[in-house]
Amino acid sequence: MSKVPAACFLVTSLIMASATSADGQQKEKKGQPFDGTWLAVGMEKDGTKLPADALEKLAIKLTLNGDAYTVTSAGAVIDSGKCNIDTQKKPSPVDITSDLGPNKGKTTQAIIEVDGENLKACYDLAGKGRPTQFATQKDSGFTLILYKREAKK
C-alpha cells in the first residue's frame, strides 16, 4: 500500500471518530441534518490533496445516526464510536470517541458543517487542538474531508 492511501485510511478513521462533542454540549438529535450516510468526495491532509483515483478506491462512507458513527472503506467497517455535535455553534464543534480501529479509546476534536446535501469536516488528528476553519496547511495535523449525502435507493 502506498503512503497516500495508508495516510488516508488513518485520516478517514480519525475523521469518522471526530463526530463527538465535549460533555455538557447539546447533542444532535435524530432526524437532524447531520444524520445519514455520507460519501467522501474530497480529502486533504496537511495541505496535500488526495488524488481522486485514490479516494475512489478507498470508497469511504461515514454514517451518522444520533450520537453514533460508523466509517467504512471499500465496504469494510474501519472505525465506529460515539460523536456529540454542538449544534449551537457554527461551525459545529465535535469530539469523536472511537471504540474500534486504530483510534480505539481516543478522542479527536473536529468541526463539522452541513449545507444541503454537502457535509464538510475538519479533524485534528495530531492532537494540536480543534480546527477553527475548514482548511489544512503543511504540518497542521488537520485533515479536511468533503462529503456528499448518499442518494436514497
Image (spheres, rainbow, N blue to C red):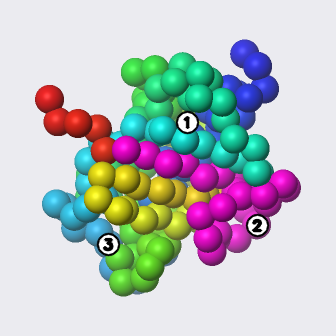
Judge the density around disc 1: few (<14), some (14-19), many (≥20) Cα neighbours within 10 Å.
some
Q: Which residues are magenta?
A: 125-148
Residue 126: give its label: none
Q: Amino acid at mark 3?
A: Lys
Report whether residue 90 is seen. yes
Distance from label 1 to label 3 (Cα)?
A: 24 Å
Is there CB contact under 8 Å for labels 1 and 2?
no
The one nearer the camera, 132 or 125, is 132
Report whether residue 25 is seen. no
Question: Looking at the image, is mark 1 or mark 3 nearer the viewer?
Answer: 3
Which residue is denoted by mark 1 in the rendering? 101
Q: Is residue 39 left or right of residue 11?
A: left
Is there CB contact under 8 Å for labels 1 and 3?
no
Q: Amino acid at mark 1?
A: Gly
Element class at badge 2: loop
Q: Quadrant of residue 134?
A: bottom right
Q: Residue at x 40, y 38 (%)?
A: 39
Question: Looking at the image, is mark 1 or mark 2 nearer the viewer?
Answer: 2
Q: Is residue 146 magenta?
A: yes
Element class at badge 1: loop
Q: Residue 153's x, y, as percent? A: 14, 29
Judge the density around disc 3: few (<14), some (14-19), many (≥20) Cα neighbours within 10 Å.
some
Q: Residue at x 61, y 70 (%)?
A: 133
Which residue is denoted by mark 2 in the rendering? 128
Which residue is denoted by mark 3 in the rendering? 27
Please identify the dominant SS of the magenta region: loop
